[in-house]
Structure formats: C-alpha cells, structure tokens
Image (cartoon, rainbow, N blue to C red):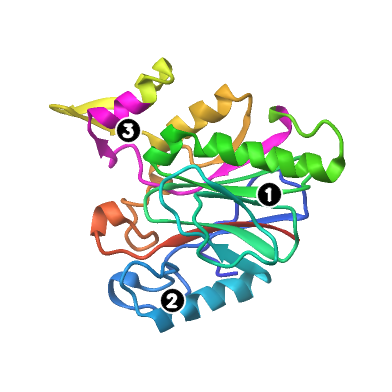
Amino acid sequence: MHPDWLNPQWSAPARVRARCTTRAGGVSVGAYASLNLGEHVGDAGAAVAANRATLGQALGVRPVFLQQVHGTQVAVLNAEVRDGVVADGCVSAQRGLACTIMVADCLPVLMTTRSGQAVGAAHAGWRGLAAGVLEATLAQLWRQSQLITGGAGPQPQDTLVWLGPCIGPQAFEVGPEVRQAFVAQQPQAAEFFVPHAPGKWLADLAALARLRLRSLGIEQIHGNDGSAAWCTVGQPQRFFSHRRDRVSGRLAACIWLD
C-alpha cells in the first residue's frame, strides 16, 4: 500500500480490509497526476489501466469498478461481475473482490457489520444521498449477511460505517434545490446548510450522511468529520477535486474480505 493512502481507523473485524487512495502512486500526468483511476475523465487509457493494475496489486484482490450515475442501484459482486456495471452501491460476501467507489468530491462510504460476513460501499454525492443510496446499500449488506448466517440478520447497531474524503463544508456551495431535497425529508437537515450568498448555501455533505445514518439507528460512524483534513477541494496536492479543477482524476475507496 502507498503510505499516503488512507487506512480507515475503525473497529471492523480483522478479516475486513479497506483503503482509500490519494493522488499518490500512479503514472498519470498533468491534471490526472498521478493515480487517476477513472476511465471516463479524459486521461490516457494506458495510464488508467496501469494505475488500476497498481491498485489491484496493492490490495491483493480485484477492485470492481462501477459505472456510477448518481442513482441508488446496488450491485451484488461475485466473480462473474465485470467492471462497468451501472450502480452507485455495491456489496460482496466473497473473497477476492473489492467493492470500489470512485470520487472526486462526492462522499465514498464504506460499510460492514461486527460479524464481517459481508462488506459494502456507496457513492454518495448529494443526489444519491438524497435519493437513498445509503439506505439501499445497507439493506443489501444486511440481506447478504443474513443469507450467510441464516438467522435474523444484523441490526443497525451491529453496523460499522466509514466516511471518506469529500468536498468540505467551506467549499460546497449549493442552490435551494439541494437544500430542499434534504430538508423536505428531514427538517433537522437545515442545520447543515449555512447561508452563503443570495439563494446559496454552504452544505456539509458528511454531516448530512451522518444524519441519515443515525436516523437508521447506526451510531458506529467513523472517518470524515467535516474538518479541513477531509476536504478534497482544499488539498490539491493530495486529492482530486472536480469542483476545484473541472478536469480531474478520480480517487477510489475500497473494501474487501481478506
């Protein structure tokens, strides 16, 4: 693993492994330097292929890359699933595969249970978050765990979640449609929108995710706390950011069973 990559600090079972890449460790150049993992952003195909190979070698398993569309579809990964399946969440109960989410300002969310029977990951931009991508991915995670154990299945209090880097609350300017999408569902979400300019607010994406998770009964939430260290926009040397650069590579958050 590259020493600059993020190693989630949480109490997941030992068989559950996770990493989140940074810009470090790849071969791409220019706006994509250096570990761009996105095929769809204009980078040279050979460079992206080399970067993905580097990631797979470091993880020791095959990262499965989704075609993310800011929706709520969840893919169940197995050995037959290839890259490019349309989904914004994925879960797996099989070794040898890494649930992989690409981001460049959106929030990557990794999840598992105390038993570590299955793992999952979700792509939580504001559209997907408001539409319920976390709820959909968690439901499939719990279902896969239940299928393995044959019992009642894990409960929210048995679930562990890690939030990765994303656009921070001092950089995420949004319009009224974004605020309304969240406040209409949870009035308390208004707390995480700070007036910034006429008709504009600064939104705290990580806090909005925590609010939704806690409303489901999940309290073991780790990682991104909204501080500057987690902001993709504010750290150009470490993180890709589409909002900051427009032409940008993609990071990847990965979770797998060892």
- Answer left or right for 15 relative to 174: right
- Marks 2/1: CA–CA distance: 26 Å
- Marks 3/1: CA–CA distance: 28 Å
Q: Residue at x 24, y 59 (%)?
A: 246
Q: Quadrant of residue 153?
A: top right
- Marks 2/3: CA–CA distance: 32 Å
Q: Residue at x 65, y 57 (%)?
A: 77
**Residue 203 tag number:** 3
In the foreground, 77 or 229: 77
Which residues make up the magenta segment? 157-181
**Residue 119 tag number:** 1
- Element assignment for label 3: strand
Q: Identify the amino acid type marked 3.
A: Ala
- Residue 5 colored in magenta in the image: no
- Element assignment for label 2: helix
**Residue 48 tag number:** 2
Local packing at callout 1 (Cα closer than 10 Å; few below 14, some 14-19, many 20+) is many
Query: Of all residues shown, which one is farthest toward the bottom?
Result: 46
Residue 185 lies, in percent from the top left, at 42, 21
Residues at marks 2 and 3 touching, judged by CB atoms closer than 8 Å: no
- Element assignment for label 1: strand
Q: Identify the amino acid type marked 2.
A: Val
Location of the N terminus (image quadrant): bottom right
Q: Is residue 122 above or below residue 219?
A: below
Tell which circle, 2 or 3, labels the residue nearer the N-terminal end: 2
Residue 130 lies, in percent from the top left, at 42, 33
Mark 2 or 3, which is nearer the eye?
Answer: 2
Q: Identify the amino acid type marked 1.
A: Val
- Residue 158 colored in magenta in the image: yes
Local packing at callout 2 (Cα closer than 10 Å; few below 14, some 14-19, many 20+) is many
